[in-house]
Amino acid sequence: MTPFTLIAAKAGVETTDRIDRFTAAAAARGWRAIPLSRSVVLAVGPGAALDFQTMGAWRLVGDVFPRRDGMAGAPECAADLIGQVWGRYVALRLRDDGRLAAVLRDPSGALDALLLQTADHWIVASDLPDWLLGAVRPALQIDDARVAGVLQDPTRTWDVSLLNGVDSVTPGGCLLLEDRPVAQQVWRPSAFVDTAADLTLDAAGDGLREVVDESVSQLSKRAGVLAAELSGGLDSGIVATSLARLDPPVRAWLHSYGAAPESDERAFALPLAERLGVTPDLLKRPDAALSQEDLEGLSSAFRPGFNAMDPVNDGIAAERLEALGIETVLTGKGGDAVFFQAFGEEVFADLRQRRGLRALVSSTLPAVARWEGRSIFSVVAGRRARPSDPQAGFLAPDAPTLAPHPWLEAAPTIGPAKRLQIVGMLDGAGFSAASLQTRVADIRHPLLSQPVMEACLALPADVLTLGRDRGLARLAFAARLTPQIATRRSKGDLTAYYGRLIARSLDVLRPWLLDGELVGRGLIDRRRADQALSAEQLIWRGGYRDIMVAATMESWLRTWRSRLETLGRSSP
C-alpha cells in the first residue's frame, strides 16, 4: 500500500510555516509532496506510485474500483462515495475554499487513517513516522486503559488509538472536521445482514463466484511482479483458482509448511498446483527461537504488531519475496470469516431467530448436532458444554473494557452467527498491517474486499454453511478445486509449531514480560505471568496466543515510550 500523510491548515489560518516544515521534512526522507490546494499538502512515501483519483469534492488515495451496481455522477456525501466505489483507500473531502472537511476510510480498512491536530493544522496519515512527529510535534500520551482493552480483545487494535492525541478512523467511518473531529459510521455490516435470504442456492453460488472473481481480477491489476498464496486450504485455493482463470503472469505460487504432520499441507497444495499447471514455491517453517531483536521489532508502526507475531517465519518469507522480486501477493486470508468457518450452534440460533418454529424441521438442526457430536435437544436448548477456562490468563484483575465496536453497537438484533462473522471481519483490517512481509511487498486480500464482505453478510449463516463450515463456498467453487480441498474436514494446525517456538524462547520471553512495561503499568499480573511462562504450564495449559499478544503489546509500549521520550527531548 502507498504510505501517505497530509497536512491541512484549519479554517482562518493563513500561515504556512508548519506546512513548509512538513514539506521540507518529507522531502528530506524521500517523500514526494503534492499540493492539493493552497492549504492542503499530501506527501507519498519514497518510491511509491501515487494512486490518486478525484471524484467530485473527494480526493481518493489508494486503489479504487467502480462498483458494478454503483450510481453514476459525482458523489456528494460519504455514503454516495462508498456506494459507487470500493477498494483500499482513504478519501479526503475538500471544501470549496480548499480546506479539509472530512476523512473517510474504506470499509475493508486495508489502508489506515489516523488524525492528529495542532492548534492550526489537521494531519492525516497512514502511519506516524518519526519525521512526521518531529515536523508537526503533536501532544501524545499512551492510554493505559485502551492498552488494557486491546489486550483483552486484540481485534480492536485496528480501530482503537492507543495514543491520546491521535484519532483513528474506523473502517467505513468518516471524521467530519469542524471545531473538533466528529465521527460518523457511514458503512455498517448490519445494513447487509440476511438481505439476500430469499435467493435460491444456485443464485447464491453464482453470485459468490462472480463477486470473488471480480475482486481477484481488480486486485491483481497494476500489481507488478505478482505472487499468490497456495496454502492447501479452501480459501487460498479459491483465490488461486480464480486468479489462474485470468491467466496473469504469476512469478511464484507460495506454500509454507511446518515439520509436524498437522502443519504440513503439501498433500493438499501439490495436487491443486498440478491441476493449475504451476510449480509451488515451497518454504519450510524453521524450528527456531525468538531473539531479543525479534521481540524489539514486533511493533514498529502505529498499531501493535499483531500481524507480525511470528517474526521468525515472517522474516524468512520476506527474504523469499525480496529474492524473487515480488511486488504484490494475493492471499486467501479472511475466508474463515466471510465464508463462515464457525459452523455450530450459533448457525441454528440465527435460523431460529429468522424462521421461528419452522427452524425445528430444517436440515440445519440435525447437521449441527452431528457436527458438534450432541443431541438435537441440547442444540435446541442451547446447552453446549462450555469448556472451563484452561488458564485464568495474566491480565490484571478488573482491567477496563472498551466500548462496543461501531460495527456492533447499533446491531442488537443480529443473531450470534452473524455477530461471529462480523467479529471475524473486524480482524480483517489487521492482515494489511505492518509486518516484515508488508515492508517488501503489497499484500492484498481479495476475500476481505467490500463487495465480498457485503455479499456474504447478505446470505444467512445456514446458507453460507449448508451443514458444515463454508459449505456454500465449497459447493460454488467445487468445479475449480481439487476434491481433496473441496471436501477436506481438517485445517492446517500450527499449534504445535507455536508451542515449540514459545518453549524454546522462554529464556527471552520471561524477562521481556516479567520485567517489562506491562507489569510496570499494572496491566498484567506478574505472578500469573510467571506461572504461565514455564515449560510445565505450556505443556498442560498452552496459552501460546495470549503470551504472544502480551509480548507484542510489550514491544509496542517500549517502542512508543522511547519515541515519545525522544520527541519530548528534541527541540521544536
Image: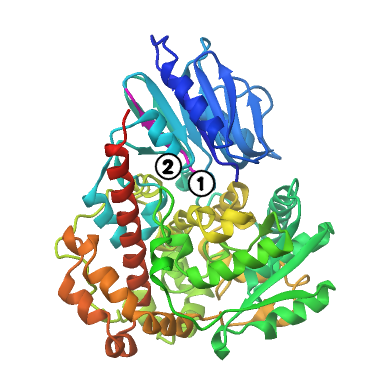
- Report the residue at 73% width, 55% height from top: 213
Q: Are marks 1 and 2 in contact (CB under 8 Å)?
A: yes
Residue 209 image position (x, y, % from top left): 71, 58
Q: Residues within 10 Å of mark 2 (few under 14, many from 20)?
A: many
Q: Is residue 198 left or right of residue 152?
A: right
Q: Nearer the viewer, residue 305 or 176?
A: 305
Amino acid at circle 2? Thr
**Relative height, residue 26 to residue 11 (above, below):** below
Residue 51 image position (x, y, % from top left): 66, 36
Amino acid at circle 1? Gly
Quote the CA–CA distance across marks 1 and 2.
7 Å
Query: Dot 1 lies on which element?
Result: loop
407 inside magenta stretch: no
- Report the residue at 44% width, 35% height from top: 132
Residue 77 image position (x, y, % from top left): 52, 25
The image's mark for residue 109 is: 1
Q: Which residue is mark 2?
A: 170
Q: Quadrant of residue 331?
A: bottom right
**Relative height, residue 232 to residue 226 (above, below):** below
- Report the residue at 29% width, 69% height from top: 512
Q: Which residues are magenta?
A: 112-118
